[in-house]
């Protein structure tokens, strides 16, 4: 965890997190109560809270949640068995987390249950076809090695069973350069945006 937190403080990752936060802020217009699934130490979520959102972070790691600021409500638990009442949130986000969830189909079903009518789901998926992913995958210690699901179309099909969706590629990364790109070879993320 310490090594991860240190890397998050690098200029490169600060730029990535800012780009992701700016994107999420645009997508969450009209939402107030937000659940972030697999939030870890809640870096992006802290930014959401600073912009007035009421944020709940859900993660299986008590250690990671222990790093989250007090402005974030944190809950230790599994995405497949969310301990929240029906219709609890305006939006649910997965920031590069759903691919690491073993039974992600159950997590999507749970997301549908905890969202209010007209609620939004936003899923940021690591794009396995991107140069960024391929470079990270060469590192034997990379977090990318822990991914359980790389078939983006399969994930998209599951989400489309419960939500009306739109998709796009986002966030070009080449080395330490970050730029706008919808090119599947350069965009580090594939995004699924859905509405109930």
Image (cartoon, rainbow, N blue to C red):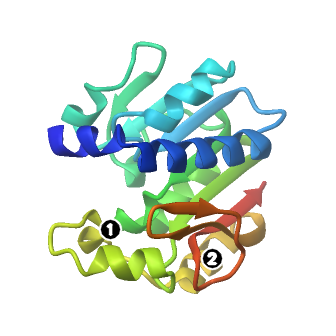
Q: Which mark is residue 75?
A: none
The quadrant holding residue 39 is top left
Q: Is residue 82 above or below residue 168?
A: above
Up-down: is 53 above or below 17?
above
Q: Quadrant of residue 43?
A: top left
User: Of the residues under marks 2 and 1, which one precedes in the sequence?
Assistant: 1
Question: x, y (%) of residue 122?
Answer: 65, 54
Residue located beneath label 2 in the image: 156
**Residue at (22% x, 33% y) in the render:** 62
Please state the horizontal and vertical placement of residue 53, each as a whole percent of the image: 66, 23
Q: Is residue 3 left or right of residue 154?
A: left
Say which quadrant the C terminus sits in: bottom right
Q: How many marks?
A: 2
**Foreground pick, 142 / 39:** 142
Residue sitting at x 62%, y 33%: 34
Which residue is drawn at the image coordinates 40% and 55% (left, top)? 80
Q: Is residue 176 left or right of residue 155?
A: left
Q: CA distance from mark 2 to mark 1?
A: 16 Å
Q: Residue furthest top?
A: 70
Local packing at callout 2 (Cα closer than 10 Å; few below 14, some 14-19, many 20+) is: some
> Residue 164, position in %: x, y?
80, 66
The residue wearing badge 1 is: 102
Q: Is residue 109 visible?
A: yes
**Label 1's element?**
loop
Q: Nearer the viewer, residue 6 or 105?
A: 6
In this picture, residue 81 sits left or right of residue 159: left
Q: Where residue 178 sits in the image (x, y, percent)?
A: 57, 60
How busy is the neighbourhood of tag 1: few (under 14 within 10 Å), some, or many (20 plus)? some
Please say if 1 is above or below 85.
Answer: below
**Nearest the camera: 182 or 154?**
182
């Amino acid at each position: 965890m310490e090594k991860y937190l240190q890397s998050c403080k690098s200029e490169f990752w600060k730029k990535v997190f800012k780009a992701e936060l700016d994107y999420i802020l645009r997508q969450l217009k009209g939402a107030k109560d937000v659940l972030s699934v697999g939030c870890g130490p809640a870096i992006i979520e802290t930014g959401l809270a600073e912009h007035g959102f009421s944020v709940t972070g859900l993660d299986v790691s008590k250690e990671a949640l222990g790093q989250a600021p007090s402005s974030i409500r944190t809950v230790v638990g599994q995405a497949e068995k969310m301990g929240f009442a029906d219709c609890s949130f305006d939006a649910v986000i997965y920031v590069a987390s759903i691919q690491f969830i073993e039974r992600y189909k159950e997590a999507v079903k749970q997301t549908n249950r905890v969202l209010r009518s007209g609620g939004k789901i936003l899923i940021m998926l690591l794009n396995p076809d991107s140069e960024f992913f391929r470079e990270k995958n060469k590192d034997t210690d990379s977090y990318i090695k822990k991914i359980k699901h790389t078939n983006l179309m399969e994930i998209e099909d599951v989400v489309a069973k419960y939500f009306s969706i739109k998709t796009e590629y986002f966030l070009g990364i080449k080395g330490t350069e970050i730029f706008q790109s919808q090119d599947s070879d350069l965009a580090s993320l594939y995004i699924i945006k859905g509405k109930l």
